[in-house]
Each structure stands twice: as C-alpha cells, then as structure tokens.
Image (cartoon, grey):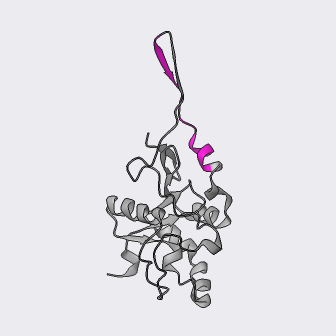
Amino acid sequence: MSVENVKYVTLSYVWGSANEDDQSGGDPSPDPLSLPSILPRTIEDTITVTLKLGYRYLWVDKYCIDQSNPQQFKEEIKRMDLIYRDSVLTIVDATGADPHGGLPGVRQGSRSPYQPSITLKGIELVSTMRRPEWDIKISPWNTRAWTYQESLLSLKKLVFTPEQLYFQCRAGMYCKE
C-alpha cells in the first residue's frame, strides 16, 4: 500500500505551554518517535473518534514530527499544507488551552451544554444554542497562528466545542445537536 492511498485524520489543538510538555502522568519516551506510556486526554479522545469513524490512522503533529530533529522539523513544516489538505478530516479541539481536557462529548459526562429555559404560565420556553461561530471565536484554539493555518488548510473539520459538535466544510457548517 502506498502512502498516497492511505486515508488518515488530522488533529488541530492547542499544545499548552512549552514547559508543561507531557503532564499526562506517563514517563516520557527515550525514543522521540514513540508515544508516551500515557497520552493526554485530548489525544486519547481523538484516537477514539478516529476509530469510531472507521479510520485507522491519525496524524498528530507533536507525535508525527520528531521535535528533537531540527532538519526533519523544517521539512515537515514545509509540508503542512499537504498534510492537512490531504487528510479525510481534521478533528478540532476548540475547547482547551492544553491537551489534557479531552474532547467534550466523547467520554460519558464530559459535556454539559448550557441551554437556558424559563417556564411561563406552564409553557417552557427554551433558547437556541449559541451560534457555532461564537464558540469557536472565543476559544483558545482560535488565538494561535498554527491552528489558524491548520483550519485554513483543512477541507473538512469536525469541531468540538464545550456545547456542541460541528461539521464544517467548504459548503457550510452543520451542528449535531
């Protein structure tokens, strides 16, 4: 099987601060190309979503680019347009400022959508959910240059926000709830 024919999913998320590296509790791997023994929740949840969607491969920059090899890092950065454009889908974590919070809605009890309601004269009135653009606009993910680039390069995105899950493509944005 050639690499060109492999269908894979990419992840766009906020790494967190540079000095926090892996607070996931696992021992850092001595081999820069192997995964730590315990992954951050966002990575674990993204693996779960990738598999449930029927895909075998997930590309995560932190683990797929050897961060200790400056030459490889430079070469891979030049290919970011191809990596994100050619993926079947980019999963976006538009919730956290680091990879430890997970993707809302993947784990039981990990999402509690706020939808205000009021009862007047026995009739319950429920507001609509916030517009997707607002959740994304106020997210830490939307403040980073790298994630902005990943968003522009991705043809299809599955965006996780605190309240909802959105699918976004060139034709528009659609919400799950």
Is residue 125 a member of the stretch shown in magenta? Answer: yes
In this rendering, the answer to whether 147 lies above or below 74 is: above
Residue at x 42% of width, y 60% of height: 45
Quarter of the picture containing the N terminus is bottom left
Position of 35 relative to 41 (above/below): below
* Residue at (49% x, 72% y) in the render: 60
Residue 148 horizontal side relative to residue 56, left or right:
right
Residue 137 lies, in percent from the top left, at 65, 49
Residue 111 percent coordinates (x, y): 46, 46
Can you say whether 166 is above or below 75 in the image?
above
Q: Position of residue 77 (x, y in %)?
A: 60, 79
What is the total number of numbered labels drawn onto the structure image? Answer: 0
Q: Residue at x 63, y 67 (%)?
A: 146
Indicate the position of residue 133 as horizontal and vertical percent values: 60, 45
Residue in the foreground of this view, choosing between 36 and 176? 36
Residue 173 or residue 21, whichever sits in front:
21
Q: Residue at x 53, y 75 (%)?
A: 62
* Residue occupying the far top of the picture: 121
Q: Nearer the viewer, residue 115 or 38?
A: 38
Is-magenta flag for residue 45? no
- The quadrant in which residue 54 appears is bottom left
Position of the C terminus, as image quadrant, is: top left
Q: Which residues are magenta?
A: 122-136
